[in-house]
Amino acid sequence: MDIIKTLAKELELKEKQISDTVALIDSGNTIPFIARYRKEVTGALDDEILRKLHERLTYLRSLDERREEIMRLIDEQGNLTDELRAKIEAATVLQELEDIYRPFRPKRRTRATVAKEKGLEPLANLIYLQAEQSGDPLDFGAKYINEEKEVLTAEDAIAGAMDIIAEMISDDADCRKHIRSMTMDHGMIKTSASTEEDSVYSMYYDFSEPAKKIAGHRVLAINRGESEKMLSVSVDIDENMILGYLTSQIVRKSIFEQIMKDTIADSYKRLIAPSIEREIRNILTENAEENAIKLFSKNLHQLLMQPPMKGKTVLGLDPGYRTGCKLAVVDETGKVCDTGVIFCTLDHHDKKKSSEYVKQLIKKHGVELIAIGNGTASKESEIFIASLLKELDTKVYYMMVSEAGASVYSASKLAAEEFPDFTVEQRSAASIARRLQDPLSELVKIDPKSIGVGQYQHDMNQKRLSETLSGVVESCVNSVGVDLNTASAPLLSYVAGISSPIAKNIVKYRDENGKFSSRKQLLKVAKLGPKAFTQCAGFLRIPGADNFLDTTSVHPESYGAASALLSELGYTSDDVIEGNLTDLKLRMKNMNIDDFCKRHSVGKLTMSDIADELLKPGRDPRDEMPKPMLMEDIMSIEDLRPGMVMNGTVRNVIDFGAFVDIGVHQDGLVHISQISSKYIKHPTDVLSVGDIVKVKIIDIDLKKNRISLSMKEA
């Protein structure tokens, strides 16, 4: 297979683009580095396309490795013909290769192998050829009677030959491919109850849907129900349709016609059908998982790219009943400057004393925002805080913050290293506060799977999910950039070219030698050599650095070109710092760009990026996102009425809708049918995590604690 041509065709790109990009990947360059700093080579391919290219490149190379291995194994058996070699070389997916290899794969002892040991293979071949037009099949079978080998009758011989033929039919690659396609097109996924008790799977107790139409989230729900022994699942298809196809392909007029028909029926029922059912369910599961991973990735990206509440002192509150609510005040730099505990969520608690304590913290530290975790006792905590805020002379707002993964982080080794003198609950309160301050910096400390913006994430291929989500985090971290002097080791480990050990070495160097004043100092960090420096330098920022370019995303390899551009256009570094470059693009129009690029060995795309960065040095793409909704009063689900129109924040987008926080303890569901008046294929067509949307309440179920919302009616 010509992988470059295949990728070019699949991605609709030029072959040179693909080959040059593959060369960059093979040279050890990271995807963020290639996307940002090698645009001339790739033709400005973005991060998303580059990751897809890398993924497909890995798959196709694995496919080629398997192709070579299969040819070697068949050749060692002495069965590799030119025709078979051509078939193997023409296969474009792994399933095709495995179908071709199936007849040659070493098998466990089967009915067919037993029959072959009895010397019945020649009889099987004779029957399969169906050349004999006269005589009695039993007469042919009688020739193979052998008491030593336990072939006692002609019927025994025929039965053994049928077992061999059944396996031959089952192993036929073309037949399997066709039956798999027929089953996918015409099969039904059927489920029934394996228990009489009511459960979350009750809608699947008597359920059927065409295999080719079933939604991914249903596949994953059914799989989970089956694994929990609540459901029985099957793939049903009209057997006559399959048998009709096999008969038309295999059976000819002969004295063995009925034997062949009986053999086909046995082969399908005993060998083909169970295997194809497993394959169909695997295909459906893989597709469902892939779509769920894509959805999780999109939601995670939106969550991580939520705008930070810069320069704000935040009070984090981790709600609780018996053990109280843990508090942590975090200043604008993320440093924890105070902690405490209040008891305010139960009737017998001294709420007045707790209120006075919180007011003192707000006044002492100039708290501007309060972040309340949305877990146990959050409703009571919110009521307490909302009431308290009304008594203040200054404006202080609060916001409910997702606790997903906070407990995982709080009990982790990382949290213990970061806050060695804090309890688990105090660490959680600090994390909740920091999540509001800078979601990206805090959430990178948590396994992405624990962040809670996906569906059925624990049922998926965990390796694939982890790799994809890590790629999302890496993409977000590098698109924003990282402050080299304040970033934690987990945050640094997602920067292109920086491994976890190197990230720890950077923090250690910083602790021992003080703040970095130059990107060049990175080369003094243990194990961070020139190659890693090239990959990471452009993504690391040093506010207040000796060289102003160290505060920007301009790569050190382009410092000469950046300085020359300013000089030739009549600017100084002070003009950049003071923002006096309003006519930069106008002046660039009057210069000979081609000549400049040639003289300074820089591409036009890179030069354009340099100009954009000089105009807005160290810009944060998150600043362009809508700000989160802050609150100062409270509502409960009992206060809601159908017909009310409210603003809300999208918390999670799933296959069948979106969950929206409207300021009560329970998020409401906007079903996909209520998102838009126009047809949409998927909620992500119009919604993203963090979006502020207007919704209308269409139903409230107090018993089940469910709120149904509509956007199209709002």
Image: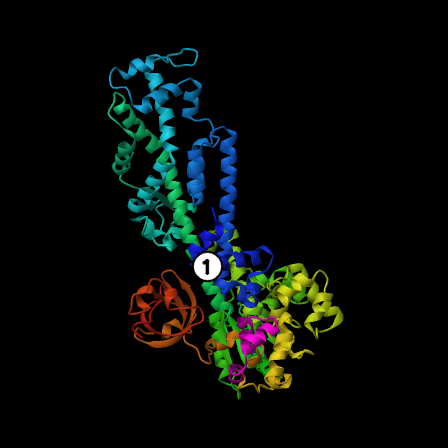
How dense is the environment of label 1, judged by Cα within 10 Å: few (below 14), some, or many (20 and up)?
A: some
| Image x and y of residue 112, in percent | 41, 25
Q: Give the overall secondary structure of the magenta segment.
A: helix
Which type of secondary structure does the marked residue at label 1 adopt? loop
- Amino acid marked by disc 1: Lys
Residue 371 x, y percent position in the rendering = 53, 74
Between residues 118 and 360, which one lies in front from this camera angle?
118
Q: On the rendered structure, is 451 left or right of 121?
A: right
Please indicate whether residue 47 sits to the left or right of residue 154 in the image: right
User: Which sits in the foreground, 307 or 68?
Assistant: 68
The residue drawn where x is 50% and y is 52% is: 57
Magenta segment: does it hold 593?
Answer: yes
Answer with the quarter of the image where residue 638 lies. Answer: bottom left
Taking 13 as reference, is 550 above or below it? below
Residues drawn in magenta: 585-612
How is this picture coloured?
A: rainbow
Question: Could you tell me if residue 406 is visible in this image?
Answer: no
Question: Which residue is situated farthest in the bottom direction here?
Answer: 393
In the rendered image, the vertical position of residue 62 relative to residue 12, given as above or below: above
Which residue appears farthest toward the right when viewing the image?
Answer: 512
Which residue carries the number 1 mark?
A: 14
Name the image quarter holding residue 81. top left
Frontmost residue, 569 versus 583: 569
Residue at image point 40% right, 73% down = 662
| Residue 199 x, y percent position in the rendering | 37, 52
